[in-house]
Image: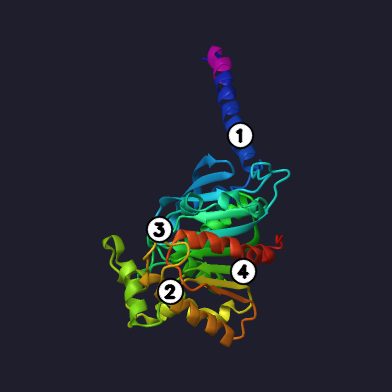
């Protein structure tokens, strides 16, 4: 038995050293500093995330964005980039003044570049132009959805999720202006009014500027809400029962919130104009013309001092006019950014 003592001692010493080694490793692990976990904003969660980037033309980049505000779906955003834009140069990253350009009903994020010469405008070569998807008839709103809210929440996607992404990772600065046509004209007015300080100026071309003007205007916008077999009450609810929601999305009723910034309003009267085929008329443009006149009068009544109107008479609801009005309003918009020429 005594002959086995050294073997037992060796076995016990080995076990002791093994246990000691394990204890030391655990102790060192608790004492060694570790890098903090990245914040949610750094990882992109739970906010929106860019999941694909596509160069579609010179100075034109499409971002595919997954949005919690849109139920986790992906939508596209087209950027018309300024000269020298390189958001991946982290050492010399520049943040650019930004023009948000909003599309109308039945269009999409490609509408402005496919239907106008916006990509060839020299004065936009030192501005980042943001053209976001807003749905076929999303109306730049967080939908009421019978009081439940939730998907789609276009306003939240644009003014919070997308804005944060662009300013954090894609060179967008904090000097912003916003413009849009038709549904997007209403969106441009709404975003400027509902988010004071976010935009330095706003322009609406043939915009839905006062959907509560009269029964005809209400019925017309409800018809748009019902497009693609949607339930029209999902957007803002019933125009009587949910009057508060409707007023909160009617630029006329938000006029006081627009009186401190430059506002550009333009519209035709729906009759055949110089840029129309012979015999063209538009009841929609005629309605929006009345709405824009009402908003212009209300803006002046509440003391707005920087209202520019171009109610050009004959003209229908068409791209030739909106392209012209973009050019006409750019000096005001770029002037508000400090980029006027």
Q: Quadrant of the C terminus?
A: bottom right
Q: Position of residue 99 (x, y in %)?
A: 60, 59
Helix, strand or loop for the magenta stretch, by majority? helix
Element class at badge 2: helix
Q: Is residue 257 magenta?
A: no
User: In the rendered structure, which segment of residues is drawn in magenta?
Assistant: 3-8
The residue labelled by disc 4 is 201
Q: Residues within 10 Å of mark 4 (few under 14, many from 20)?
A: many
Q: How many marks do you count on the picture?
A: 4
* Mark carried by residue 104: none
Answer whether labels 3 and 2 touch (C-beta < 8 Å): no
- Residue 288: numbered disc: 2
Distance from disc 1 to disc 3, alpha carbons, whole Å, reads 56 Å
Residue located 47% across and 75% down the image = 209
Asked whether residue 146 is in view, the answer is no
Q: Position of residue 320 (x, y in %)?
A: 48, 59
User: Looking at this view, is 140 or 224 the one in front?
Assistant: 224
Residue named by callout 3: 135
């Amino acid at each position: 038995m005594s002959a086995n003592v050294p073997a037992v001692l060796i076995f016990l010493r080995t076990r002791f050293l093994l246990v000691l080694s394990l204890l030391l490793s655990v102790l060192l692990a608790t004492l060694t500093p570790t890098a903090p976990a990245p914040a949610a904003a750094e990882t992109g969660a739970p906010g929106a995330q860019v999941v694909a980037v596509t160069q579609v033309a010179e100075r034109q980049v499409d971002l595919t964005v997954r949005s919690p505000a849109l139920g986790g779906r992906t939508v596209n955003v087209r950027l018309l980039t300024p000269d020298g834009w390189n958001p991946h140069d982290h050492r010399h990253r520049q943040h650019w003044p930004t023009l948000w350009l909003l599309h109308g009903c039945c269009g999409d994020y490609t509408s402005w570049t496919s239907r106008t010469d916006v990509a060839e405008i020299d004065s936009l070569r030192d501005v980042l132009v943001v053209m976001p998807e807003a749905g076929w008839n999303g109306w730049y709103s967080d939908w009421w959805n019978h009081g439940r809210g939730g998907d789609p929440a276009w306003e939240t996607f644009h003014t919070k999720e997308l804005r944060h992404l662009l300013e954090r990772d894609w060179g967008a600065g904090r000097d912003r202006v916003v413009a849009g046509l038709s549904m997007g004209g209403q969106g441009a007015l709404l975003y400027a009014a509902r988010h004071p300080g976010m935009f330095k100026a706003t322009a609406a071309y043939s915009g839905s500027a006062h959907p509560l003007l009269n029964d005809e205007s209400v019925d017309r916008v409800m018809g748009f809400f019902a497009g693609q077999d949607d339930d029209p009450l999902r957007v803002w609810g019933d125009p009587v029962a949910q009057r508060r929601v409707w007023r909160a999305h009617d630029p006329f009723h938000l006029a006081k919130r627009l009186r401190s910034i430059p506002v550009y309003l333009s519209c035709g009267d729906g009759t055949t104009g110089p840029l129309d085929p012979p015999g063209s008329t538009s009841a929609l443009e005629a309605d929006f013309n009345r709405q824009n006149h009402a908003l212009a009068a209300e803006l002046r009544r509440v003391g707005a001092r920087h209202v520019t109107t171009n109610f050009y008479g004959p003209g229908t609801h068409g791209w030739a006019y909106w392209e012209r009005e973009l050019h006409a309003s750019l000096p005001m918009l770029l002037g508000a950014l400090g980029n006027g020429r």
